[in-house]
Image (cartoon, rainbow, N blue to C red):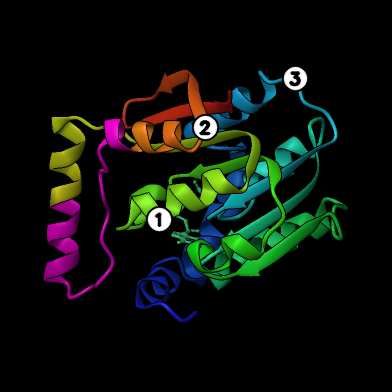
Amino acid sequence: MPCECCNITNEQFGKDTAEADLKAYRRTGPAKHTRLILEAIRSLGLTDASLLDVGGGIGAIYHELMQDTVTRATHVDASSAYLAAAKRETEKRGNGGKVEFIHADFTDVADSLAPANVVTLDRVVCCYPDFRSLLAAAAGRSSRALVMAYPRDNRFSRAVVALMDWFLKMSRDPFRVFVHPVGEMDALLNKEGLYRVSLRRSFIWEVALYQRA
Ligand SMILES: C[S@@+](CC[C@H](N)C(=O)[O-])C[C@H]1O[C@@H](n2cnc3c(N)ncnc32)[C@H](O)[C@@H]1O
């Protein structure tokens, strides 16, 4: 964990959060934004695919896709607590050995990873200040598609995030949430050869599927 921002992220997503998320997943399945990501990936009709899940949390995306789409996955996460919970669930499902777990800031290790058919970032870009480095690194590892969920870029989410960041600042928590400009993220991915083929929305989140031209 060399970078300061990654240490902050590791602190933010600790054991209690990871255990609560795993419990919720076991009780009710994937959250709405994750379900939209799963639908986007399944729309590609892939089988025997490889997945690179950046900031995958408890690993809901590959737990689900290993039923029909994905046969191997790499999960890179800044949170050691999330990785531990994801690993436990992977083993419980009999998929141990099919997933590689890496505790790191993805931008530090991306170059050392093999490309995957699909790269996912489910609510990750909004935790990271430098979306350009994060998305360029993610695009560079994707051979076919990239799917991401991020907060909708509108006045409402900007106001909510500004309030959240104000509370974090007041409680001297160095973690921050970001609403990054969707147009700039889109232009960056286009430059990397990825083009948006679908866009789905929930009240707060937007899920964009990109495919290589
Ligand atoms: C809000 S959580 C989302 C977890 C999960 N994807 C979900 O939607 O439930 C953000 C996740 O991104 C990870 N993360 C943020 N920046 C990262 C980075 N630069 N490299 C690796 N993981 C990162 C955090 O550790 C955390 O697991």
Tell me the kind of residue under disc 2. Answer: Gly
Tag 2 secondary structure: loop
Q: Which residue is mark 3?
A: 45
Count neighbours of disc 3 (C-alpha within 10 A) and say few if under 14, some if 14 to 19, many if 20 or more: few
Q: Point out the frontmost of discs 1 and 2.
A: 2
Point out the tag, 1 or 2, that comes first from the N-terminus.
Answer: 1
Tag 3 secondary structure: loop
Q: Is residue 137 above or below residue 142?
A: below
Give the alpha-carbon distance from disc 1 to disc 2, as whole Å.
16 Å
Is 170 inside the magenta-drawn segment? Answer: yes
Q: Which residue is mark 2?
A: 193
Instruction: Left or right? Give the position of 14 relative to 47.
Output: left
Q: Which residue is mark 1?
A: 133
Residue 83 is drawn in which quadrant? bottom right
Residue 179 % position (x, y) = 25, 43
Is residue 84 visible in the rendered image? The answer is no
Q: Residue at x 47, y 62 (%)?
A: 17
Q: Is the C-beta separation of discs 3 and 1 under 8 Å?
A: no
Give the alpha-carbon distance from disc 3 to disc 1, as whole Å.
29 Å
Q: Point out the frontmost of discs 2 and 3.
A: 2
Residue 183 is drawn in which quadrant? top left
Is residue 190 visible in the rendered image? The answer is yes
| The magenta segment | 163-184
Residue 192 % position (x, y) = 49, 38
